Amino acid sequence: MLIISNTVTIDEWELDFSAIRSQGAGGQNVNKVASAIHLRFDIKRSKLPDFYKQRLLNLNDSRLTKEGVIVIKSQSHRTQELNKEEALNRLKELIISATQVQKKRRATKPSRNSQRKRMDSKTKRGQTKALRKNISL
């Protein structure tokens, strides 16, 4: 069971793990052992609250398929257990980040003093560059 918050959990039957061979260099062991993990989580079939489902389905993420399945591949560790744990943590972080509501941005104006400082620095920079010009006699 994966605990997302005090009220939201994901049961083991909702998660589909498959072991695959890791990519990259690894010596003799890499061709024999399937230590990488593919984690598949079907959002529509899950028992997550509707708010969570909507936010996840609206994500613009390459790990989300058109069918509404999140696919996470973990292969950074040498053992299946550690890769499985990392995939679960990444799924949890993805769900939590998708459900956090961003604070509205309030439009503000730059202060008069900051505008004056900006213009002064631009003038000073222009004068410095003007002094670099060739002097024609």
Image (spheres, rainbow, N blue to C red):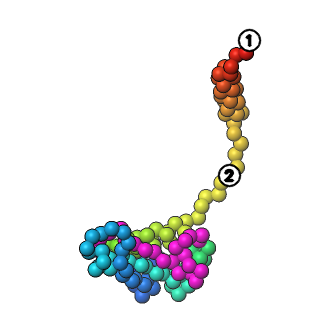
Q: Which mark is residue 137?
A: 1
Q: Identify the residue shown where x is 61% and y is 58%.
A: 103
**Viewer-proximal residue among 90 and 46:** 90
Instruction: Decide whether the magenta segment is chiefly helix, strand or loop.
Output: loop
- Circle on res. 106: 2
- Residue extent of the magenta highlight: 59-81
Nearest the camera: 76 or 23?
23
Q: Is residue 69 visible?
A: yes
Question: Residue 62: x percent and y percent?
Answer: 55, 71
Q: Amino acid at mark 2?
A: Arg
Nearer to the camera, 62 or 32: 32
> Residue 112, relative to residue 132: is it above or below?
below
Label 1 and label 2: CA atoms lie apart by 55 Å
Q: From this viewpoint, which residue is outermost toward the left? A: 28
Query: Is residue 133 placed above or below 56 in the rendered structure?
Result: above
Q: Earlier in the sequence, mark 1 or mark 2?
A: 2
Tell me if 17 is positioned left or right of 55 in this view.
Answer: left
Give the x, y percent position of residue 104.
65, 57
Name the residue at 30% across, 78% down: 31
Tag in front: 1 or 2: 1
Measuring from the top left, give residue 73's x and y in whole percent: 43, 74
